[in-house]
Amino acid sequence: MPSGVADPVGFAAESVETEGDTATIRVRAVAGRGICPNCGRASFRVHSRYHRRLADLPAGGRMVRLVVLARRFYCHEARCSRRIFAERFRELAPWARRTARLDTIVQHLGLALGGRPAAVLPGG
Ligand SMILES: [Zn+2]
């Protein structure tokens, strides 16, 4: 349900938990495939999933912990030396470091966080 704020770079929020002043946001990539970093071939077969903690950043008066549900894929390219690869978050790395963008996420999830939309952080 779009409300004027776009989903962050192809990621969807899985869940939001708050404990005290810390909000833990779990996100996953919406893309149904991974691209092998070795050969560039797309794969749709998921090998396994794991959690990757990306950032602990202050936003809107809370500490926001960003956890990505990342996947490992099989590479089916016969000539590729990689059999399994972890999906990459090229877009997410710079995004996670920018509090301004993180603030957008928090605003996006404002209702789930049980509060008002976060105030815009100074600087950035
Ligand atoms: Zn490959």
Image (cartoon, rainbow, N blue to C red):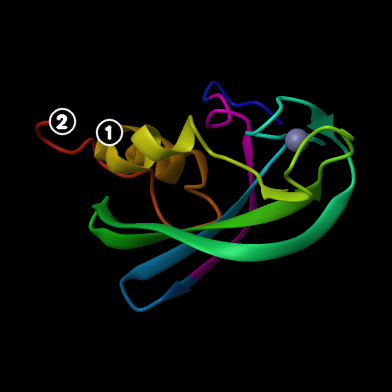
Q: Which residue is mark 2?
A: 124
Q: Is residue 9 on the magenta stretch?
A: yes
**Disc 1 vs disc 2: Cβ atoms closer than 8 Å?**
yes
- The residue lying furthest to the bottom in this view is 20
Whole-number angstrom distance, CA of label 1 to CA of label 2: 6 Å
Q: Is residue 115 on the magenta stretch?
A: no
Magenta span? 6-17
What x and y, as percent, mark residue 98?
Answer: 28, 36
Which label belongs to residue 49? none
Quadrant of res 99: top left
Tell me the element at label 1. Answer: helix
Left or right, residue 33 beside residue 54: right
Tell me the element at label 2. Answer: loop
Q: Identify the residue at image location x=79%, y=49%.
A: 83
The amino acid marked with disc number 2 is Gly
Q: Identify the residue at image location x=42%, y=40%.
A: 107
What x and y, as percent, mark residue 20?
Answer: 34, 78
Q: Is mark 1 within 8 Å of ligand 1?
A: no
